[in-house]
Image (spheres, rainbow, N blue to C red):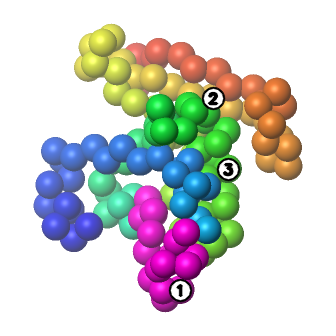
Amino acid sequence: IQTMKSLRSQLRVHMQPVQFLGDQNMLKHTVPKSLQSHLFAWRALDDAEIDIRFGSDAPIDPPSLIENYRGLREAEKSGIAKPSKPWTEYHQHPDQAWGADFETHLTWSGSESDLSEENQNVMIEIRKKT
């Protein structure tokens, strides 16, 4: 991450929190406990002011915003620091197809206690950057 800091104006790191859900059991048995908090380093990248964006891991995992959110929550329970901003901000991507002045914006409202897809309200829109 220290090496990446000098390149931060040129970098955008794409990460998939949903991967934690499939990897967590294997990681418990293969990575020493003292190193597990360093996995999925979205907070460390965030603190280093490196642009990180979340996305799906399709076609490996089905695309799901809610599963990404669940991955962040489960990772935090395992001692991995959560990102510093609201999780929805990391799903907002500059959208080259619409031009450099636009980005994809995500708004979420739903139940944190029931993460079933039918209990969520997600709105995605293309917005002009402010």
Tell me if residue 22 is in the magenta stretch. no
> Image point 43% across, 74% down: which residue?
38
In the rendered image, the quadrant that contains the C terminus is top left
Q: Dot 1 lies on which element?
A: helix
In the rendered image, the quadrant that contains the N terminus is bottom left
Q: Determine which residue is flagged by label 3.
A: 70
Q: Dot 3 lies on which element?
A: helix
Q: Residue furthest top?
A: 98
Point out the frontmost of discs 1 and 3.
1
Q: Main secondary structure of the magenta part?
A: helix
23 or 76, nearer to the observer: 23
Amino acid type at image mark 1: Lys
Q: Determine which residue is flagged by label 1.
A: 33
Mark 2 or mark 1: which comes first in sequence? Answer: 1
Mark 2: few/some/many CA within 10 Å (<14, 14-19, 20+): few
Where residue 121 sits, quadrant-wise, is top right
Cα gap from disc 1 to disc 3, whole angstroms: 21 Å
Mark 1 or mark 3: which comes first in sequence? Answer: 1
Mark 1: few/some/many CA within 10 Å (<14, 14-19, 20+): few
> Image point 53% across, 16% down: which residue?
125
Amino acid type at image mark 3: Arg
Where residue 53 sits, quadrant-wise, is top left
Q: Dot 2 lies on which element?
A: strand
Mark 3 or mark 2: which comes first in sequence? Answer: 3
Q: Determine which residue is flagged by label 2.
A: 107
Q: Which residues are magenta?
A: 26-43
* Residue 10 at x, y percent in the picture: 16, 45
* Residue 118 at x, y percent in the picture: 82, 27
Amino acid type at image mark 2: Thr
Point out the frontmost of discs 3 and 2.
3
* Residue 89 at x, y percent in the picture: 51, 40
Name above or below for residue 45 compared with residue 59. Answer: below
